[in-house]
């Protein structure tokens, strides 16, 4: 009986969603930003709506996850998938700051000798490590953290 | 344990095989379907890196990496595209991990994007960022606008994780329902479930918000709940104020319960049994940053973050920086930060100075970072690293780069690293 009820609820929800979807009629966002942006932009220079909150100020790296979890499509307007995977990788072996050592002006994690410093930062704020390394890590991590 | 790892490796291999199959099918389709072949736009980036350094056991490491990102767009229809990216590595000298080569398929999916309703359907190895989900999945991701400001998304498939030791089937799926009211607020509720060997491995739910109640005030953040341990994992919010005559004030507040937050990980360091993560610990972190551009080219900023633990005590991180930049020409920066933990072992001062300059087709940059520990580590009180980098634009599509880094730190008396790169872009431009 429970299975039948569950199926009925799912069917009703799907019907309702289809009905709601059929009435949406919103225009999709631009697939690509009309102007190529070469430096971290202040979106509010041009956009006065909700997009102005996405100004890429100096501390944007620390809170970019909040926008990504709500607005991936907006990120994709300017950034290709590889921009995310440069840092958010599965078994990445190269630090982003090694791949982009010439981009010294960019905010980037783990610059310089981070091998030793990660022991301190990891004790003080392990949750910040967990976000990227909790379920995606590499063989060098496991040389010590077996 | 080896059998379990082997089983996991087989699962990873199956997942990679599945994503690889998607890749091959769509690359072949561009070749063998004439109507598609004529319409497609190909673009991509090849990044070849050669890294020379010394490993911790003094062996010499010389590695070549090839990163390839490739897109096929306008596949007979401008709403359909295909994207793939991955890397492979080959050791030219000694092996650090007991094998000569490694590789990873980072993403590989066929994408449909509708011109209406922001409908997206991605199939293959996809990255999903939706509410509580920040996952890499071999499977399906879809989202769409609904009416009256509502939106919905969902995903499902096999999780792509590193070093899991759970045998059996691997399934992950989740969804997010959101509502946006113009420029005033956006709120979402989301959930995900991950099963391993038919057991609930993760069950997480969350609420994410962005609120813009009045001009110059934005609040965004997320709360996430662990439905397996029945406790809140994290509350994390950021408040942005300004600009007030160019002055921006940003604040962050977060609260994390270690027992719920570190419940599932594939890295031993993050387990509650590791001795590194304190069980029953809870941490509250409050921070803020104030930034002000003195001129169009000079910006100053100060920041502060305080950590308060139920068990371990307190820690403070604070500092400031000055940045100078001239668009398209060059710039420089200087910064100081201090970490002050509850013991001398957890205290350091960090200094950084950098500069970069463009000379025609040549870009050069220099960077110096010094970390001064309050307590010497392995007899070293000052850990510093200096790097020089140059990149030359041979043509619009070709760039050559090289850098050398010298470091003196608690692990290496003298660590010299050399890095070469050849970058090639082909096809249409656009996007970072």
Image (cartoon, rainbow, N blue to C red):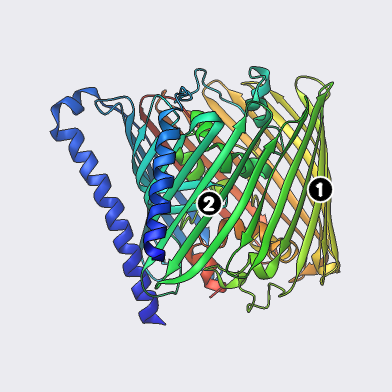
| Residue B253 to residue B118: above or below | below
Residues at discs 1 and 2 both on one chain: yes
- Helix, strand or loop at label 2? It is strand
Residue nearest the viewer, comparing B299 with B122: B122
Q: Residue furthest front?
A: A1
Task: Determine if residue A5 is in view.
Answer: yes
Of A38 and B160, the residue lying toward us: B160
**Foreground label between 1 and 2:** 2
> Which subunit holds the residue at mark 1?
B
Q: CA distance from mark 1 to mark 2?
A: 24 Å
Q: Position of residue B250 (x, y in %)?
A: 79, 38
Does residue B186 appear to the left or right of B319 in the view shown?
A: left
Could you tell me if the residues under marks 1 and 2 are in contact, i.e. CB atoms within 8 Å?
Answer: no
Q: Can I make out residue B92 in this image? A: no
Please tell me which of labels 1 and 2 falls first in the chain: 2
Residue ID for mark 2:
B134
Return the mark for residue B47: none
- Percent x, y for residue B195? 44, 67
The residue that appears at 51% across and 57% down in the rendered structure is: B192
Q: Position of residue B166 (x, y in %)?
A: 43, 74
Residue depicted at 82% across the width and 70% down the height: B312
- The residue nearer to you, when weighing A40 against B349, is A40
State the mark number for residue B287. 1
Q: Which quadrant of the figure contains the N terminus of chain B?
A: bottom left
Residue at image point 42% right, 36% down: B423
| Chain letter for mark 2 | B
């Amino acid at each position: 009986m429970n299975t039948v009820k569950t199926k009925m609820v799912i069917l009703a929800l799907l019907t309702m969603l289809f009905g709601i979807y059929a009435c949406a009629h919103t225009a999709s966002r631009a697939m690509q930003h009309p102007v190529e942006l070469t430096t971290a932009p202040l979106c509010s220079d041009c956009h006065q709506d909700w997009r102005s909150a996405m100004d890429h100020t100096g501390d944007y790296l620390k809170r970019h996850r909040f926008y990504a979890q709500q607005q991936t499509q907006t990120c994709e307007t300017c950034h290709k998938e590889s921009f995310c995977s440069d840092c958010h990788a599965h078994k990445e072996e190269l630090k982003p700051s090694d791949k982009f050592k010439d981009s010294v002006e960019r905010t980037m994690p783990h610059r310089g000798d981070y091998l030793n410093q990660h022991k301190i930062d990891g004790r003080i704020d392990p949750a910040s490590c967990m976000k990227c390394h909790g379920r995606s890590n590499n063989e060098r991590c496991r040389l010590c953290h077996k | 344990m080896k059998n379990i790892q082997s089983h996991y490796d087989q699962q990873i291999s199956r997942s990679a095989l599945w994503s690889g199959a998607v890749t091959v099918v769509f690359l072949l389709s561009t070749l063998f379907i004439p109507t598609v072949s004529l319409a497609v736009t190909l673009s991509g980036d090849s990044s070849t890196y050669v890294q020379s350094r010394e490993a911790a056991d003094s062996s010499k490491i010389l590695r070549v990496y090839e990163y390839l990102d490739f897109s096929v767009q306008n596949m007979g229809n401008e709403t359909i595209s295909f994207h793939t990216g991955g890397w492979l590595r080959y050791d030219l000298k000694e092996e650090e991990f007991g094998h000569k080569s490694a590789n990873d398929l980072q993403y590989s999916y066929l994408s449909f994007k509708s011109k209406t309703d922001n409908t997206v359907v991605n199939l293959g190895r996809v990255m999903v960022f939706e509410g509580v989900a920040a996952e890499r999945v071999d499977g399906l991701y879809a989202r769409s606008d609904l009416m009256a400001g509502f939106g919905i998304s969902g995903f499902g498939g096999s999780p792509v994780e590193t070093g899991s030791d759970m045998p059996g089937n691997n399934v992950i799926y989740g969804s997010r329902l959101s509502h946006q009211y113009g420029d005033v607020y956006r709120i979402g509720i989301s959930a995900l479930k991950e099963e391993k060997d038919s057991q609930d491995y993760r069950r997480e739910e969350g609420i994410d918000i962005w609120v813009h109640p009045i001009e110059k005030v934005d609040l965004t953040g997320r709360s996430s709940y662990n439905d397996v341990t029945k406790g809140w994992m994290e509350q994390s919010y950021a408040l942005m104020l300004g600009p007030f005559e160019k002055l921006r004030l940003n604040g962050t507040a977060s609260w994390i319960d270690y027992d719920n937050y570190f419940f599932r990980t594939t890295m031993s360091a993050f387990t509650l049994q590791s001795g590194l993560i304190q069980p029953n610990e809870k941490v509250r972190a409050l921070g803020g940053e104030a930034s002000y551009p003195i001129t169009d080219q000079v910006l100053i900023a100060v920041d502060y973050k305080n950590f308060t633990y139920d068990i371990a005590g307190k820690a403070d991180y604070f500092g400031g920086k000055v940045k100078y930049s001239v668009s398209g020409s060059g710039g420089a920066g200087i910064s100081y930060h201090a970490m002050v933990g509850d013991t001398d072992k957890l205290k350091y001062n960090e200094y950084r100075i950098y500069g970069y300059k463009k000379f025609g087709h040549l870009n050069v940059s220099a960077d110096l970072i010094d970390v001064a520990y309050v307590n010497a580590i392995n007899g070293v009180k000052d850990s510093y690293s200096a790097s020089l980098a140059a990149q030359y634009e041979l043509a619009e599509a070709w760039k050559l780069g090289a850098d050398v880094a010298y470091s003196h730190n608690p692990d290496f008396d003298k660590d010299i690293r050399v890095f070469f790169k050849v970058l090639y872009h082909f096809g249409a431009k656009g996007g970072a």
